[in-house]
Image: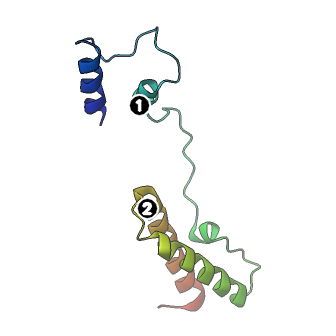
Amino acid sequence: MFKILKNLSKSLGGGKSAEPKSTAKPGSLLDKVNKGAPVSAKVEPPKSAEELCGITPKMAKDEIKAQLKLLFRRYNRSASSLDAKMRGEADQMLDAIVQVREKNFGEI
């Protein structure tokens, strides 16, 4: 996609380079595309399956079952989404739901 924007910028700019100049407005679309993800992004340690599902040690088996049922219903719908980010999150949550269910209620 970046190559397309660069070539489009060259063709509209009369053959000039698509590199951002100091005269460009800060916050323009091209700046946002060039910027990408922040380098100093904070990396969080991976959460356990129980934390992802919102399960606490004090919860009764019925509460755990109801929580897992609700989460499964929610994320099973998202698993077939066209949005790749939403699909990835749904897959991660469905795996966590299975892990918690097997831990608390035995092998499926």
- Judged left or right of residue 21, residue 65 is right
Query: Mark 2: which amino acid?
Result: Gly
First-in-chain label (2 vs 1): 1
| Nearer to me, 71 or 26 | 26
Q: Is residue 88 above or below residue 54?
A: above
Query: Mark 1: which amino acid?
Result: Val
Instruction: Residue 75: give x, y in percent of width and height.
Output: 52, 72
Instruction: Residue 11: give x, y in percent of width and height.
Output: 23, 20
Badge 1: how crowded within 10 Å, few (<14), some, or many (20+)? few
Q: Image point 42% across, 66% down: which residue?
A: 81
Q: Residue furthest right?
A: 58
**What residue is disc 1 on?**
33
Q: Is residue 92 above or below residue 44?
A: below
Q: Image point 52% across, 69% down: which residue?
A: 93
Please give the count of numbered marks on the rendered protein.
Answer: 2
When asked about the image quadrant of residue 88, the answer is: bottom left
| Nearer to me, 84 or 11 | 11
When asked about the image quadrant of residue 36, the answer is: top left
Badge 2: how crowded within 10 Å, few (<14), some, or many (20+)? some
Which label sits in the foreground, 2 or 1?
1
Instruction: Residue 56: give x, y in percent of width and height.
Output: 72, 74
Q: State the scheme by which the image is colored.
A: rainbow
Calculate the distance from the C-alpha at mark 2 to the C-alpha at mark 1.
23 Å
Instruction: Residue 17: give x, y in percent of width and height.
Output: 28, 13
Q: Secondary structure at mark 1?
A: helix
Q: In the picture, which quadrant includes the N terminus? A: top left
Q: Residue furthest top?
A: 23
Q: Secondary structure at mark 2?
A: helix
**What residue is disc 2 on?**
88
Q: Image point 69% across, 89% down: which residue?
A: 61
